[in-house]
Image (spheres, rainbow, N blue to C red):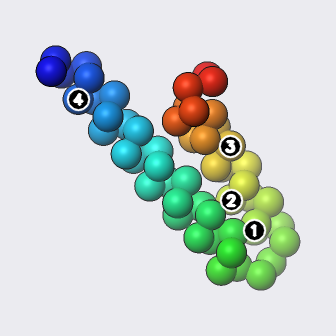
Amino acid sequence: MDIFGFYNILYRVIYIYVIGMCIWSIFTHKEFQRQIGYAMIMVPFLLRVLGIK
């Protein structure tokens, strides 16, 4: 396994962690503006994990 494969896995773990924290924040915060903000932060990470972008 080369170093680039390791970094790819590491980045995916970090992205999945960020997505998990954003989803948790969306469900724990009741303010609508804050939920929208977390959703906007989450979208690029989600696209990256899914391999679209």
Residue corresponding to mark 4: 6
Q: In the rendered structure, are the residues bearing label 2 and label 3 in contact, judged by CB atoms less than 8 Å apart? A: no
Residue corresponding to mark 3: 43
Crowd class of label 3 (few under 14; some 14 to 19; many from 20; radius 10 Å) = few
Say which element carries label 2: helix
Residue corresponding to mark 1: 34
Position of 12 relative to 14 (above/below): above
Q: Distance between the residues labelled 4 and 3?
A: 24 Å
Position of 51 relative to 10 (above/below): above
Tally of numbered discs = 4
N-terminal of the two: label 4 or label 3? 4
Q: In the rendered structure, are the residues bearing label 1 and label 4 in contact, judged by CB atoms less than 8 Å apart? A: no
Amino acid tagged 2: Tyr
Say whether residue 6 is left or right of residue 32. Answer: left
Which residue is at 80% across, 78% downward? 31
Which residue is at 65% across, 80% downward? 28
Quadrant for residue 46, please give it. top right
